[in-house]
Image: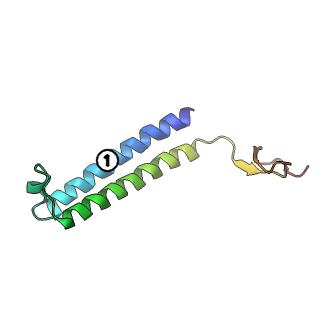
Amino acid sequence: MERSVLGLIVGLAVWVLVASLLNRSLRFGLEGYAAAEPQMTFTHAMMAARLALLLAGRRCGHKGCRDVEHACMRTPLRYSSSKMGSPVRTSPGASTVA
């Protein structure tokens, strides 16, 4: 539970950071973007750049969240030869053969 909350916080922080940095780069790099942003009168190139910003920020936020959650895992999820074929948590050195 704690790792999920920590992952959520880190993911949101990474997303805000990446989105802010990319938005500032759009303002300086794309001519007319800073003037068009308050009125939301974007050209097609500006809208495509905003979509790319959204996707990049989302990917980075997801990766930050996933990395924190995986780094905090105590025991790895391993597949055993159980009758139902579902994953069973075992210790790293334990044998999964019944």
Residue drawn at (55%, 43%), measured in percent from left and top?
A: 69
Residue 91, how many percent across, how many down?
Answer: 77, 44
Left-right relation of 79 to 81: left
Residue 9, how many percent across, how many down?
Answer: 43, 37
The answer to which image quadrant residue 32 occupies is bottom left
Which amino acid, by three-letter code, is at mark 1? Answer: Leu
Q: Name the residue nearer the viewer: 62 or 50.
A: 50
Residue drawn at (91%, 49%), measured in percent from left and top?
A: 98
Residue 19, how many percent across, how many down?
Answer: 29, 51
Reply above or below: 21 against 75: below
In the picture as drawn, the residue positioned furthest to the right comes out as 98
| Rendered-image quadrant of the N terminus | top right
- Which element carries disc 1, helix, strand or loop? helix
Residue drawn at (53%, 37%), measured in percent from left and top?
A: 4
In the picture as drawn, the residue positioned furthest to the top comes out as 2
Residue 57, how many percent across, how many down?
Answer: 35, 53
Q: How many marks can you see?
A: 1
Reply above or below: 44 against 4: below
| Residue identifier under label 1 | 17
Q: Name the residue nearer the viewer: 91 or 82.
A: 82
Query: Within 10 angstroms of label 1, few (less than 14), some, or many (20 or more) residues?
Result: some
Left-right relation of 53 to 67: left
